[in-house]
């Protein structure tokens, strides 16, 4: 039996191709983004900062902190990734010391976007705060500068938030100085020199998770609240100086109360405030067999007046059911009177799980939500409409001419 050289060549090529499959499988790289912080910027643009991980072989191989410009274009409000900017590696070196980032926040003040990083200075094991800023909506960022080294051991650090207070940057952080004791300290920082002007302690505890929002000379504080006498809720209050929580306080009831922390966010909207938080919900997989999964979903409240509970109304946010997805960690702003929401979106357990990505949604009334915001759409000033009209016009002119010429040639 003769064996063709062509067959031998094809077998060899086939062996090389098939043997390469395992190596290509192990080379798959995934990317995931989460921990969103959304803030307004200059020229009606918005700045998003987020954590961006590179994953290979089910292991995070690289972590980065990035920023994205969200802006209005002639045809849409652009929120997708488009030449996003690297702010810093998540873990970086500062003055020869290894720094491991822990949490981030963002503040917009005096036409400048500030990113505050709470991190561990591994040389000492303590919590430190670093700042970088951008004057062009995140296209470029300044060198990172350490603004304060605290005496808090990183293992005792709980969380922090940042906002503006009058003409200064304001940073508050919660920690446990000893067992069963929790306290909040705060800093005020000069936004130009980045020098700390005041380092003090609040008489009130802000919370384990809290979001800060500057509005009309006050800093509004929203957090998960729990004590021995009340059920867990989201607390909304404010402070004019940082030293104590003052004025009216409201407590917002979660829909299910199945999560440890609600991670609320707040924004001024419609002559009041809108609060969004997350919770866990049972997602039905097979009711007959009693198979359920728990997924995160978003919920919210509109507060017309902190002193009048009758002005408070509950809203389901984005979706009132999980539908196999998990939605969590909201960040809020407003755009053209719309509520502008960024959050983490992931395929839930029901769909096999997935890696989080940042999604966006808009609402004009807190009830109906859309991820395709067009704003005040002007048909006569839209390039896409011009193109469509021109295309139809060409067919309307060219097609009849073609038919007439074709008939005349046949004659």
Image (spheres, rainbow, N blue to C red):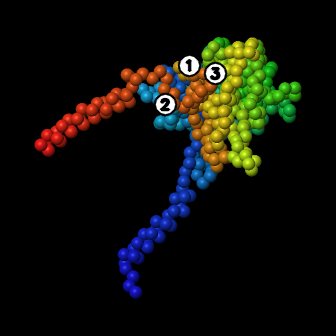
Residue 204 horizontal/vertical position (percent): 80, 21
Position of 288 compared to 18: left or right? right
Is residue 346 visible in the rendered image? The answer is yes
Observer-nearest of 382 and 411: 411
Crowding around mark 3 (Cα neighbors within 10 Å: few <14, some 14 to 19, many 20+) is many
Residue 107 horizontal/vertical position (percent): 61, 24
- Compare marks 3 and 1 and give the one earlier in the sequence: 3
Is residue 168 visible in the rendered image? The answer is no
Checking the image for residue 78, the label placed there is: 2
Which residue occupies 17% across, 41% down?
407
Checking the image for residue 21, the label placed there is: none
Q: Which residue is mark 1?
A: 337
Task: Measure the alpha-carbon separation of dots 2 and 1.
Answer: 17 Å
Residue 297 horizontal/vertical position (percent): 67, 35
Which residue occupies 58% across, 28% down?
369
Q: Which residue is mark 3?
A: 267
Q: Secondary structure at mark 1?
A: loop
Task: Measure the alpha-carbon separation of dots 3 and 1.
Answer: 12 Å
């Amino acid at each position: 039996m003769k064996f063709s050289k062509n067959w031998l060549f094809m077998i060899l090529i086939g062996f090389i191709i098939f043997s390469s499959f395992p190596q290509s499988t192990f080379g798959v790289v995934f990317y995931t983004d989460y921990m969103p912080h959304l803030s307004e910027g200059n020229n009606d643009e918005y700045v998003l900062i987020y954590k961006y991980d590179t994953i290979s072989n089910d292991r995070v191989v690289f972590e980065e902190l990035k920023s994205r410009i969200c802006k209005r274009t002639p045809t849409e409000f652009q929120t997708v990734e488009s030449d996003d900017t690297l702010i810093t590696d998540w873990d970086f070196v500062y003055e020869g010391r290894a720094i491991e980032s822990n949490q981030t926040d963002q503040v917009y003040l005096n036409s400048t976007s500030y990113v505050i990083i709470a991190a561990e200075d591994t040389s000492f094991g303590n919590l430190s705060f670093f700042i970088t800023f951008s004057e062009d909506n995140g296209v470029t960022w300044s060198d990172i500068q350490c603004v304060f080294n605290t005496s808090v051991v990183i293992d005792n650090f709980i969380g922090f938030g940042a906002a503006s207070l009058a003409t200064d940057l304001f940073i508050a952080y919660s920690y446990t100085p000893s067992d069963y004791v929790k306290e909040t300290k705060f800093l005020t920082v000069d936004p130009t020199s980045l020098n700390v002007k005041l380092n003090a302690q609040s008489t009130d505890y802000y919370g384990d998770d809290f979001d800060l929002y500057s509005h009309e000379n006050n800093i509004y504080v929203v957090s998960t609240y729990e004590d021995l006498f009340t059920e867990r809720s989201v607390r909304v209050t404010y402070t004019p100086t940082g030293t104590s929580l003052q004025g009216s306080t409201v407590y917002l009831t979660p829909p299910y109360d199945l999560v440890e922390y609600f991670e609320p966010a707040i924004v001024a909207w419609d002559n009041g405030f809108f609060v969004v938080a997350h919770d866990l919900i049972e997602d039905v997989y097979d009711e007959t067999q009693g198979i359920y999964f728990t997924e995160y979903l978003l919920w919210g409240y509109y507060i017309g007046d902190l002193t009048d509970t009758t002005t408070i109304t509950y809203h389901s946010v984005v979706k009132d059911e999980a539908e196999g997805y998990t939605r969590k960690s909201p960040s809020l702003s407003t755009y053209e009177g719309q509520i502008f929401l960024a959050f983490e979106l992931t395929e839930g357990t029901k769909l096999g799980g997935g890696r989080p990505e940042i999604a966006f949604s808009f609402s004009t009334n807190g009830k109906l939500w859309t991820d395709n915001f067009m704003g005040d759409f002007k048909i006569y000033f839209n390039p896409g409409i011009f193109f469509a009209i021109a295309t139809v016009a060409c067919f309307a002119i060219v097609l009849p001419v073609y038919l007439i010429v074709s008939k005349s040639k046949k004659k």
